[in-house]
Image (tube, grey):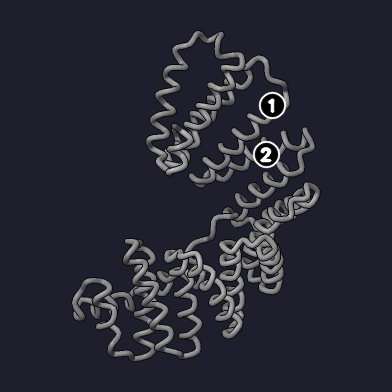
Amino acid sequence: MAKYLGTIQDQPRRLELGQEVLKRLETYPSDKLTGRLGAEFIRIIGDIANQQLTLRQYAAAEVSYQRILKLVSQIEGIDEKECEDLKFGTYHQLGIVAEEQRQWQQAEQYYQQTLQISVKYDNHKDQALTYHQLGSVTLRKRDWAKAEQYYQQALKAFSDANERYLQAGTYHNLGMVAQEQRQWQQAEQYYQQALQIYIESNDRYKQAKTYHRLGYVAHEQRQWQQAEQYYQQALRLKIESNDRYAQAKTYPNLGYVAQEQRQWQQARSYFLQALETWVEYKDNYSRDIALGSLARLWQASSDKDLPAVVAPILGATVEETEALLREMLGEKESGEAKPGQKSLDAPE
């Protein structure tokens, strides 16, 4: 039943079911939960913790994972390696819980514990995964040198483990590190290495994200034709997957490229397509970014018809829309996200 609920993504019901099963197991004598039944007991708690994490119940998830660590040392009948594997997985999840709450130091401490376990058993893949996570934490802390060091260690460990596909995510994130430092040539090189692996693996979703990043790098260097080409490749892959929300992240960037070249009608079309999607998905933050872009386009192009075109999308009158656009123009320029940088992508 729990597996079925997970398949249909009914996380609240799966969590409720797990908690009911746990209550029954807790009625067993404590000595019964130190053998193989104890392993099942831990599995149930682990599943509960994972659902809590998915549902962003971070405090509850941390309590559950810490409970697993306490129980692992009490189980009889499992060897040391199996015990350490349980600890590795639990510390890893605790690291994610800390990351989600932007508790960077705590997350790094948990990942260092997983690293100790993977080094102890000479598990190159686990070491690589941990180095990658450590890179992601330091990337979010904007500690570029340390992030690059961890990612390079991850690449070597992935190579030692013969995990070529997993190297792609690390190359992608190294591209982000270089991009954040405006090292455009280095960023492009890393993104191209990631892209090559995604093409080999036919991972079209990841290809789209990397093409988008390559577009941003070209954009920042004012290479308009190259930027448009990369953004169009990203958009094509997103359209193939029928992911309208992801498409809306690329339309504004195409709009910026068109606007820089004074292609007003093309820019307007792209910004409007993004706005329609953000309104449909009730993403007010992104909607306001699109409106800010349209307001600046309105100002730059003297497009008198633009408020009338935007009004139906917002469900407002032309007068209300024009007032809103003027309000957007009065806001500080820093309120608009840079192309492709509405937020730092979650490391992959």
**Vertical side of 258 occupied by 174: above or below:** above
Q: Residue at x 54, y 69 (%)?
A: 237
Q: Residue at x 39, y 70 (%)?
A: 289
Residue 100 vs 41, above or below: the answer is: below
Q: Nearer the viewer, residue 225 or 295?
A: 225
Which quadrant of the view contains residue 345? bottom right
Q: Quadrant of residue 24?
A: top left
Nearest the eye: 78 or 60? 78
Q: Is residue 295 above or below residue 145?
A: below
Give the position of the N terminus as an image quadrant: top left
Q: Residue at x 36, y 68 (%)?
A: 277
Left or right of residue 188, residue 25 in this image? left
> Which amino acid, mark 1?
Glu
- Where is residue 336? Give x, y as percent: 42, 71
> Which residue is denoted by mark 1 in the rendering?
82
The amino acid sitting under disc 2 is Gln
* CB-based contact (under 8 Å), mark 1 and mark 2: no
Quadrant (top left/top right/bottom left/bottom right) for the C terminus = bottom right
Q: Is residue 283 above or below residue 18?
A: below
Give the residue pinned by disc 2: 112
Q: Is residue 340 visible?
A: yes
Count of numbered circles in the view: 2
Report whether 233 appears left or right of 310: right
Splitting the image into 4 quarters, where does residue 319 fall? bottom left
Q: Nearer the viewer, mark 1 or mark 2?
A: 1
Q: Residue at x 61, y 82 (%)?
A: 226
**Mark 1 vs mark 2: which is more N-terminal?**
1
SS type, badge 2: helix
